[in-house]
């Protein structure tokens, strides 16, 4: 009921955003059902135009582009989601610990984060990938650690702001332990901002992985993935074909959708706080 | 004045430390390759001569700290080593490409910065108007677009369909300035768009934050006109945050150039880095990574220092 | 003679979350040349909104739906922007509550002073600078020839407020709107600003709207007073008449609020808290409290009085163990306490509780009332769900709140209700001592009075002791058995309350006590005229000719 009531209060742009996210997610989850062919199945000639049993035509190896798109959604979203979750796990735990314990824990973590953040993320990951080789586990570890630094900064700042509020001091004066203070007093109040950040961070990571894949250093073939699909089909553009624009557009489609929802969410929680 | 100097010196020192840490990290990163780095780099099938050459190249016969310092002093002298794939000196490969990258970034910045500040100010002044809403939606989309999406759309329209602009931004030293500019129109627009959107949004937020402050209301109640409120009351206070955003975005721009260079096959440092990474040409990766990182750190440092210098409260603190 | 400013049937609405809310409801107001009208009311009365509307200004999200504002024959409602701008700053000027926020941090004071006169071509910068200097001197600002070239953050709050009064007078306006100009200041500073304002008004026979929540303050400057409540006019009358013979019960309540006085009771024997020779600081070099010794007896209230920066809140932090004492000893019910919170037993924490100034941030906005009040019961007494519910309802009843609040969030409560919940939370663990840190300062006067009465009733009922930290002497009178006066981290004087309100005293105590405005229109004049005023060091009068 509560959910439905909230849904009715959404703005038009938020509803559009939700629909965009929902469509992409459904495609990703139902990929094996929706896709007319196998993920890596070569079914026809190279770079066929849309139509003729191939909704979006075929790719550079003659695979059905629509099938690749649907599976691509599945792979890219799953990996981006996993990375976002890992980044949040590490970043939020670190940030909350730093804010509540202060002292050397805070010093150490914050200095490490400062150094990592002084380094441009794309360059750093390119260098690590060149040393360790491009593989999915390396990709996941590197990007989630890189993004954990940003989550850490936010979580720490939020927790610091909440920590100085008197209800936290009151809990301290009652003799409540650190665990209670973190989970019951601080976290619930930091949650709205963290949820919004989760959406934005996911977008960022999604774009980042796509960029790496586009550069040929992300998700490796034969797994379908939007970024590498753009790269592999880039040549088609000079034959006046739309092929690489489909996966590129799909990336934009999902990130715009998430941004619209997050925008509405931020606006709404700001209003609730002002009340 | 003293505390101001102290703050600036502190930031500069922090920047220097960061560069040092970065250089160590880059060095250690290469060191950390499992097993014999030479074999790891060249693979099991490498000839003994190649391996020996590489070992000497990497100075593997010396202890790590000696190697680090000799590497640093080499870098300081401009000797960045030799490429593993074509044996050419890295410095020679990088110099021209880096200037190309800067040229592209500069072109994008020249257009994006004034435009972003102007649009951001307009959006803030006419808040909630159709202009503001339009800018808000379009900048949100621009931020969500991957650069290659924008790039290929531009190529599809202007190079393939209309045929009025080159889709491949190939430039070489023999070209005139005008020709070069024409070649980089599309990559410049692509690169500009994302930065423009972000800068505009931040400028708008900074100005709105100031326009809702009590001293602006006071100025209105003193009978100060709208124009003067902006120029005399809002801008001096908005300067620090805006400069900060602009330079941070420039730092981002120099790095973000990598993808755009690949899209347009532009002979820049980013393209070189990506190539080197896929070939695992470590000396080239090391050198171009270091250059990118230092540029990024330098720009961030400039942002820090300038925002201290332009903050009226800090500037006038005794 | 026609009034200078005449407001008729003014109705103003503001956009709320869902609908338009009426902020001002059919207000009528007249202001003649050289007259001062006091606008008084609690928060939400619409007094600031009315003050701004008198300048033809409405804040974003507000609009005037009805009525007229006539200034010297000119209709301000719906007047063109240019015409309004021409009036503001030159003929109607404004003095804001927080000068620190209302001066532009990027410009020197004198440039902000000169802005309107120079922009309008009334005088050149040099003339404006000289005028600023004369006004600064007249308003007792130190080094009037130099202070104008300082930036706002380089000048103290009281001085800044006076500089803002000077700025309002730059073009010799016909009307000045003062919006709570002394509310954010300490009492001794308030006197300085108040006398500056009085001086300013008398200088050129300027008319003024003086907005405040404090009747005693407005009584010192106003010729007439208008009382507002929830955007409506309650009553209006001459200052003396209104104070001596208020017609409406709301006005009477406002008048009586500061006249509460606790009946004197004999000191009890038992000492609950004893602090001996305590010194503490956040850094090793600088102490915030020094050599503090005090006793709190069972069932009694000790009030700690002091202005901002006196170290009274730090003292509370030392006693609770948040700021461990570097020297000295704190004993509670005969046993010596560990200096820091970590070393104290759960039983100690149960018996020593605290209530804060800002109820908004003292309650976790994500927890319902039942959770907030239930937690100490569960934590200290391990009550089961049923016992907890019974006890929470009992606590609600004790603080005069019904069971309907059991399932609510703090955001659904008013400020006073929130503060009651904070008190109940402290009571839940059945403490012996509650430290109350400015618990009434963030509340409206009538609400604050209710809280004080509640605290007193609870003390009579439960025998709990209070250490009551406050800057407000009316509060001290209403609740304290003993009083401690603090200045710069040290105790300057302490004793039973009745003795403290009788001279002679330490210089600071006298100055502090004499600075509290009384509900007597002649109070400020008398104080300024008395030799006491000079002795108290409020003013170093300069007899130079002005303007």
Image (cartoon, grey):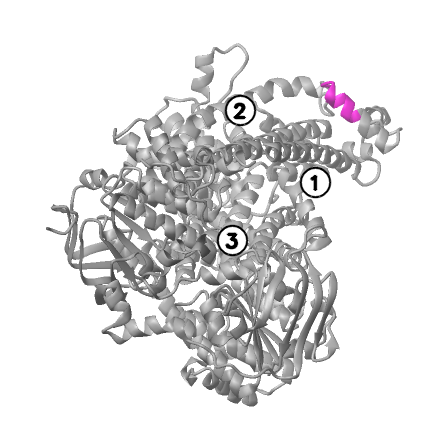
**Mark 2 belongs to which subunit?**
B
Labels 1 & 3 near each other (Cβ < 8 A): no
**Mark 1 belongs to which subunit?**
A
Labels 3 & 2 near each other (Cβ < 8 A): no
Q: Which stretch appears magenta?
A: B71-80
* In the image, residue C287 lies in the stretch drawn in magenta: no
Which part of the image, by quadrant, shows the C terminus of chain A?
Answer: bottom left
- Tell me the distance, in whole angstroms, between the alpha carbons under discs 1 and 2: 25 Å
- A209 vs C404: above or below: above
The reply to whether label 1 and label 3 mark residues of one chain is yes
Let me know if residue C43 appears in the view.
Answer: no
Left or right, residue B297 beside residue C166: right
Q: Residues within 10 Å of mark 3 (few under 14, many from 20)?
A: some
Residue A72 image point, x, y percent: 52, 49
- C498 vs C42: above or below: below
- Tell me the distance, in whole angstroms, between the alpha carbons under discs 1 and 3: 30 Å
Residue matched to label 1:
A133
**Mark 3 belongs to which subunit?**
A
Left or right, residue C200 beside residue C345: left
Residue matched to label 3:
A197
- C104 vs A159: above or below: above
Q: Which residue is nearer to you in this view: A252 or B313?
A: B313
Residue B254 image point, x, y percent: 55, 30
Q: Which residue is nearer to you in this view: B112 or C417?
A: C417
């Amino acid at each position: 009921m509560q959910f439905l009531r909230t849904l009715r209060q959404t703005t038009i742009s938020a509803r559009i955003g939700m629909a965009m996210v929902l469509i992409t997610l459904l495609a990703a989850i139902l990929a094996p059902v929706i896709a007319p062919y196998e993920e890596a199945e070569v079914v026809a000639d190279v770079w066929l135009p849309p139509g003729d049993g191939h909704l979006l035509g075929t790719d550079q190896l003659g695979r059905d582009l629509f099938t690749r798109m649907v599976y691509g959604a599945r792979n890219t979203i799953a990996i981006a989601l996993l990375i976002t979750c890992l980044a949040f796990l590490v970043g939020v735990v670190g940030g909350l610990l730093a804010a509540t314990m202060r002292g050397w824990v805070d010093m150490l973590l914050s200095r490490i984060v400062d150094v990592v953040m002084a380094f441009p993320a794309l360059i750093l990951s390119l260098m690590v990938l060149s040393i360790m080789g491009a593989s999915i586990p390396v990709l996941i570890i590197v990007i989630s650690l890189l993004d954990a630094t940003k989550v850490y900064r936010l979580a720490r700042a939020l927790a610091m702001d909440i920590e100085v509020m008197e209800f936290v001091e009151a809990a301290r004066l009652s003799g409540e332990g650190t665990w209670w203070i973190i989970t019951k007093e601080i976290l619930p109040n930091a949650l709205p901002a963290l949820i919004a950040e989760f959406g934005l961070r996911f977008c960022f990571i999604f774009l980042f992985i796509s960029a790496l894949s586009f550069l040929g250093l992300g998700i490796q073939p034969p797994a379908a993935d939007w970024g590498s699909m753009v790269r592999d089909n880039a040549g088609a553009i000079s034959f006046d074909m739309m092929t690489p624009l489909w996966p590129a557009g799909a990336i934009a489609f999902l990130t715009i959708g998430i941004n619209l929802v997050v925008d509405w969410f931020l606006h709404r929680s700001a209003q609730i706080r002002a009340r | 004045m003293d505390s101001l100097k102290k703050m600036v010196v502190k930031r500069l020192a922090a920047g220097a430390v960061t560069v040092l840490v970065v250089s160590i990290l880059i060095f250690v990163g290469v060191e950390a390759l499992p097993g014999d780095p030479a074999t790891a780099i060249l693979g099991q099938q490498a000839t003994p001569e190649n391996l020996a050459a590489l070992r000497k190249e990497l100075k593997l016969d010396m202890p790590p700290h000696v190697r680090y310092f000799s590497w640093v002093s080499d870098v300081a002298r401009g000797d960045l080593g030799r490429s593993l794939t074509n044996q050419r000196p890295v410095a020679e490969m990088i110099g021209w490409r880096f200037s190309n990258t800067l040229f592209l970034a500069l072109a994008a910045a020249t257009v994006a910065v004034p435009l972003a500040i102007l649009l951001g100010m307009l959006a803030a002044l006419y808040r909630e108007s159709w202009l503001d809403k339009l800018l808000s939606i379009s900048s949100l989309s621009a931020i969500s677009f991957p650069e290659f999406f924008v790039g290929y759309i531009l190529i599809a329209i202007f190079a393939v369909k209309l045929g009025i602009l080159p889709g491949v931004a190939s430039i070489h030293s023999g070209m005139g300035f005008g020709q070069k500019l024409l070649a980089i129109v599309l990559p410049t627009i692509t690169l500009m768009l994302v930065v423009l959107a972000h800068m505009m949004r931040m400028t708008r937020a900074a100005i709105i934050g100031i326009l809702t402050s009590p001293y602006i209301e006071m100025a209105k109640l003193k009978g100060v006109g709208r124009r003067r409120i902006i120029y005399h009351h809002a801008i001096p206070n908005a300067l620090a945050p805006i400069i900060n955003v602009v330079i941070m975005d420039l730092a981002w721009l120099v790095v973000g150039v990598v993808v755009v260079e690949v899209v347009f096959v532009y002979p820049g440092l980013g393209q070189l880095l990506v190539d080197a990474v896929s070939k695992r040409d470590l000396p080239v990766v090391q050198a171009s990574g270091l250059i990118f990182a230092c540029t990024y750190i330098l720009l961030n440092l400039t942002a820090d220092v300038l925002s201290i210098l332009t903050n009226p409260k800090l500037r006038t603190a005794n | 003679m026609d009034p200078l400013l005449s407001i008729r049937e003014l109705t103003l609405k503001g956009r709320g979350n869902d609908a338009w809310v009426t902020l001002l409801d059919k207000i009528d107001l007249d202001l003649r040349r050289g007259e001062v009208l006091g606008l008084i009311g609690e928060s939400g009365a619409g007094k600031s909104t009315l003050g701004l509307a008198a300048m033809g200004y409405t804040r974003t999200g507000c609009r005037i739906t009805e009525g007229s504002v006539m200034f010297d024959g000119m209709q301000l409602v719906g007047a063109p922007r240019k015409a309004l701008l021409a009036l503001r700053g030159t003929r109607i000027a404004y003095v804001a509550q927080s000068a620190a926020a209302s001066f532009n941090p990027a410009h020197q004071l004198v440039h902000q002073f000169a802005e309107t006169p120079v922009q309008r071509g009334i005088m050149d910068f040099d003339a404006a600078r000289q005028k600023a200097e004369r006004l600064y001197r007249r308003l007792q600002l130190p080094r009037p020839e130099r202070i104008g070239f300082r930036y706002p953050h380089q000048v103290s709050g009281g001085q800044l407020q006076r500089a803002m009064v000077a700025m309002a007078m730059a073009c010799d306006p016909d009307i000045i709107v003062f919006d709570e100009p002394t509310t954010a200041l300490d009492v001794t500073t308030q006197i300085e600003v108040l006398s500056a304002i009085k001086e300013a008004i008398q200088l050129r026979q300027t008319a003024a709207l003086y907005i405040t929540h404090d009747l005693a303050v407005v009584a010192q400057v106003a010729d007439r007073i208008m009382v507002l409540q929830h955007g409506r006019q309650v009553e209006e009358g001459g200052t003396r008449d209104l104070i001596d013979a208020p017609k409406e019960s709301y006005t009477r309540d406002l008048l009586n609020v500061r006249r509460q006085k606790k009946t004197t009771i004999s000191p009890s024997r038992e000492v609950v808290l004893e602090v001996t020779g305590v010194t503490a600081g956040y850094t090793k070099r600088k102490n915030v409290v020094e050599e503090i010794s005090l006793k709190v007896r069972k069932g009694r209230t000790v009030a700690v009085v002091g202005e901002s920066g006196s170290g009274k809140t730090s003292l509370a932090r030392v006693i609770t163990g948040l700021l461990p004492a570097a020297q000295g000893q704190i004993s509670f019910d005969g046993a010596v306490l560990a200096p820091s919170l970590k070393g104290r037993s759960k039983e100690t924490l149960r018996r020593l509780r605290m209530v804060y100034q800002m109820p908004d941030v003292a309650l976790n906005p994500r927890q319902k009332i039942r959770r907030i009040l239930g937690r100490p019961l569960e934590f200290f007494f391990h009550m089961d769900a049923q016992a907890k519910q019974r006890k929470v309802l009992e606590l609600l009843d004790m603080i005069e709140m019904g069971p309907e609040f059991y399932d609510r969030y703090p955001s659904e409560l008013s400020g006073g209700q929130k503060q009651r919940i904070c008190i109940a939370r402290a009571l839940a663990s059945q403490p012996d001592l509650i430290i109350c840190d400015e618990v009434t300062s963030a509340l409206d006067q009538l609400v604050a009075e209710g809280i004080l009465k509640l605290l007193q009733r609870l003390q009579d009922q439960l025998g709990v002791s209070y250490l009551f930290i406050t800057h407000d002497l009316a509060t001290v009178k209403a609740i304290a058995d003993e009083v401690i006066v603090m200045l710069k981290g040290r105790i300057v004087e302490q004793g039973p309350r009745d003795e403290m309100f009788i001279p002679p005293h330490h210089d600071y105590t006298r100055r502090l006590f004499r600075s509290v405005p009384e509900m007597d229109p002649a109070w400020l004049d008398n104080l300024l005229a008395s030799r006491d005023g000079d002795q108290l060091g409020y003013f170093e009068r300069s007899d130079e000719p002005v303007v």
